[in-house]
Amino acid sequence: MAYPSANWTIMVYISADGVLANFAVESLKQLKRAAGNGVVVAAQVDTNGTIQAERYVFDKSGDLTSLAHSKPRPVYPPPRLGTPDPKNLTNFIDWASKMYPPR
């Protein structure tokens, strides 16, 4: 299902573990803040096996104190060889391009 097109789509593909996972969450908060007014953010986050990779779409500004109200979408099919596998990156780009096609 495609959503309305956007002026700009920012695609972010994050892999983080340990202390870097905290930076990944903070980056997602900043990206959520930047969304809106024709800017859409599509992100895939993998914390190296701690949790399954998840995808987020931010298309409007909102409360950024936490990501608790943002509903991640599970990655389907789940990455089997991890974030570095080029097939996983291609799958993410294809997904994000279909979600918000260019105008």
Image (cartoon, grey):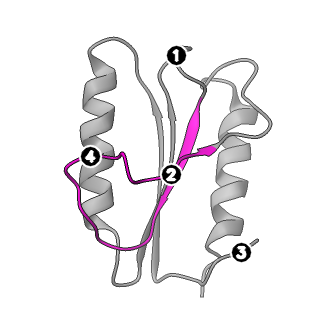
Tell me the CA gap for discs 3 and 4: 26 Å
Residue 6, position as x, y percentages in the image: 51, 81
Prevalent SS, magenta region: loop
Which residue carries the number 4 mark?
Answer: 66
Q: What is the spatial separation of the Cα atoms under label 1 and label 4, in whole angstroms?
A: 21 Å
Whether residues under marks 3 and 1 lie with C-beta atoms below 8 angstroms apart, the answer is no
Residue that carries the numbered disc 2 in the rendered image: 71
The answer to whether residue 3 is left or right of residue 72 is right
Name the residue carrying label 1. Answer: 48
When asked about the image quadrant of residue 90, the answer is: top right
Q: In the rendering, at what x and y percent does residue 34 appear?
A: 27, 66
Looking at the image, is mark 3 or mark 1 earlier in the sequence? 3
Reply above or below: 52 against 18: below
Q: For the residue carrying disc 3, how many other residues have a C-alpha within 10 Å: few (<14), some (14-19), or many (20+)?
A: few
Q: Secondary structure at mark 1?
A: loop
Q: Earlier in the sequence, mark 3 or mark 4?
A: 3
* Residue assigned mark 3: 2
Camera-near label (1 vs 4) is 4
Marks 2 and 1, how far apart in space? 20 Å
Q: Looking at the image, is mark 3 or mark 2 earlier in the sequence?
A: 3
**Label 3 – label 1 distance at C-alpha:** 29 Å
Instruction: Compare residues 62 and 75 and report the one nearer the observer.
Output: 62
Q: Mark 2 or mark 4, which is nearer the start of the sequence?
A: 4
Magenta stretch holds residue 57: yes
Q: Amino acid at mark 2?
A: Lys
Discs 2/1, front? 2
Q: Earlier in the sequence, mark 1 or mark 4?
A: 1
User: Quick check: marks 4 and 2 in contact, CB under 8 Å?
Assistant: no
Q: Locate the C terminus by quadrant.
A: bottom right
